[in-house]
Image (spheres, rainbow, N blue to C red):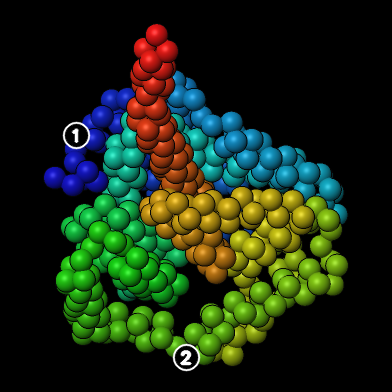
């Protein structure tokens, strides 16, 4: 049985870290009404609200106690990165032109904790139990999201014929399914690839589907372990599955309407009007309207409230709650403090690609690219989800480098032993000759 769906590895993880597993699964299964009070998503606010609740206290307790119970040394550089990000958030809020706000700072600290607590927990899980056990916990989280998406779809069928998990958006759920597919692809788990691909297709997310095709192309072209015949077989199967899915969906009037809407040439040409907001964000930076340390972390809605565009098709003003790009969100919110954060992510992408660490490379680059063109990294479940994904990637990268150094050390010792033995032999021969 493949390691991703092997209950033995999941049981190993659960017995070693039950609080971590339970805390994450409970959080991923929360209904939308628990996180978002009625009407709160429709209210214009000057910053991205934190939606702090009892569920964060439960998750925090489970992750902190569970991680400490693993008794694993977390690399100092990962803790230093977390400390720097927290300091950057506080500095940007303190220096905001809107004035210091404790409410904003509490929301931002909650956001920071939601990311770094699962990030550190999964780094510890990988180092303590190995990547197989840690990845089964991720699969369980994704399974909870899939399960809740079935209920959401049943409730909203007739108004929105797209799949997404409770407490999440279509975009963020599609990203979760995309990362799950990539993990299954690298671990050669065919059934999980098919299930995650089906849910991904049913989100009808153009961005995620484009990235999905890109990941498949990269994997089949670069994976040395796959023969040409296997690559062709896998490619044909995926094309057939996609074609069959589209065929049956197009026979359903509701899904046909969604597909035609997603293929709207005007929306595709303007990247669903993102180009307009990206140009506005670039103008803010170029016009020196962004302070050195930014306008305040997660404070970008305050400048977007002044910029709305008229939609001739809908006959009203369109408001975007974010720039739909982490580059502008962090660049405008944190200013120059965002540069080391982006540099760190790009450096991880380069290193994992340079040393051939496939899965961490794909997860890191999917995070950066997906958030650069479809920013979802600010609501509670999305932040926890990406903290878990990136924690696994970081943990596996650390483990990979440790094994590489270990192999290099053993190789050096093997080559040095015969030389060490040869010296006494030569010395002995010389002494016998001299005698």
The residue positioned 39% from the left and 21% from the top of the image is 426
Q: Judge the density around disc 1: few (<14), some (14-19), many (≥20) Cα neighbours within 10 Å.
A: some
The residue that disc 1 covers is 8
In the image, is 340 to the left or to the right of 205?
A: right
Task: Determine the CA span between mark 2 and mark 1.
Answer: 49 Å
Residue 415: x and y, percent? 37, 33
In the image, is 96 to the left or to the right of 133?
A: right
The residue positioned 17% from the left and 71% from the top of the image is 229
For residue 67, above or below residue 91? above
Q: Which mark is residue 111?
A: none
Quarter containing the N terminus: top left
The residue positioned 25% from the left and 84% from the top of the image is 250
Q: Nearer the viewer, residue 145 or 367?
A: 367
The residue positioned 19% from the left and 41% from the top of the image is 6
Residue 119: x and y, percent? 49, 40
The residue that disc 2 covers is 265
In the image, is 417 to the left or to the right of 286?
A: left
Nearest to N terminus: mark 2 or mark 1 = 1
């Amino acid at each position: 049985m493949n390691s991703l769906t092997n209950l033995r590895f999941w049981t190993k993880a659960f017995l070693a870290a039950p609080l971590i597993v339970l805390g994450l699964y409970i959080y991923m299964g929360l209904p939308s009404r628990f996180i978002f009070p009625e009407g709160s998503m429709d209210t214009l606010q000057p910053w991205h609200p934190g939606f702090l609740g009892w569920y964060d206290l439960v998750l925090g307790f489970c992750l902190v106690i569970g991680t400490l119970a693993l008794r694993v040394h977390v690399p100092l550089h990962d803790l230093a990165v977390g400390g720097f990000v927290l300091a950057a958030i506080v500095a940007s809020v303190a220096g905001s032109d809107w004035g210091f706000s404790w409410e904003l700072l509490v929301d931002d600290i909650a956001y920071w904790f939601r990311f770094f607590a699962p990030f550190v927990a999964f780094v510890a899980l990988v180092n303590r139990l190995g990547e197989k056990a840690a990845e089964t916990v991720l699969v369980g989280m994704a399974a909870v999201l899939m399960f809740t998406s079935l209920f959401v779809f049943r409730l909203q069928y007739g108004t929105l014929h797209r799949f997404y998990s409770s407490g999440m958006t279509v975009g963020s759920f599609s990203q979760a399914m995309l990362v799950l597919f990539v993990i299954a692809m690298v671990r050669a788990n065919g059934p999980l690839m098919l299930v995650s691909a089906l849910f991904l297709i049913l989100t009808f997310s153009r961005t995620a589907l484009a990235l999905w095709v890109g990941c498949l192309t990269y994997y089949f072209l670069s994976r040395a372990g796959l023969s040409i015949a296997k690559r062709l077989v896998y490619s044909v199967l995926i094309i057939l599955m996609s074609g069959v899915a589209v065929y049956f969906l197009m026979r359903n009037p509701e899904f046909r309407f969604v597909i035609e809407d997603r293929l709207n040439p005007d929306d595709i040409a303007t990247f669903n009007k993102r180009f307009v907001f990206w140009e506005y964000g670039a103008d803010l930076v170029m016009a020196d309207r962004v302070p050195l340390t930014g306008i305040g972390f997660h404070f970008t809605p305050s400048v977007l409230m002044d910029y709305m565009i008229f939609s001739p098709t809908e006959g009203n003003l369109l408001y975007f709650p974010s720039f739909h790009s982490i580059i502008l969100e962090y660049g405008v919110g944190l200013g120059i403090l965002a540069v080391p954060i982006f540099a760190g992510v790009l450096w991880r992408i380069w290193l994992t690609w340079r040393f051939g660490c496939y899965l961490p490379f794909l997860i890191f680059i999917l995070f950066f690219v997906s958030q650069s063109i479809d920013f979802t990294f600010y609501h509670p479940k999305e932040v926890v989800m990406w903290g878990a994904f990136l924690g696994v990637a970081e943990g596996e990268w650390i483990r990979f480098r440790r094994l590489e150094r270990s192999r290099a050390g053993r190789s050096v010792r093997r080559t040095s032993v015969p030389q060490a033995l040869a010296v006494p032999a030569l010395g002995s021969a010389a002494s016998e000759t001299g005698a």
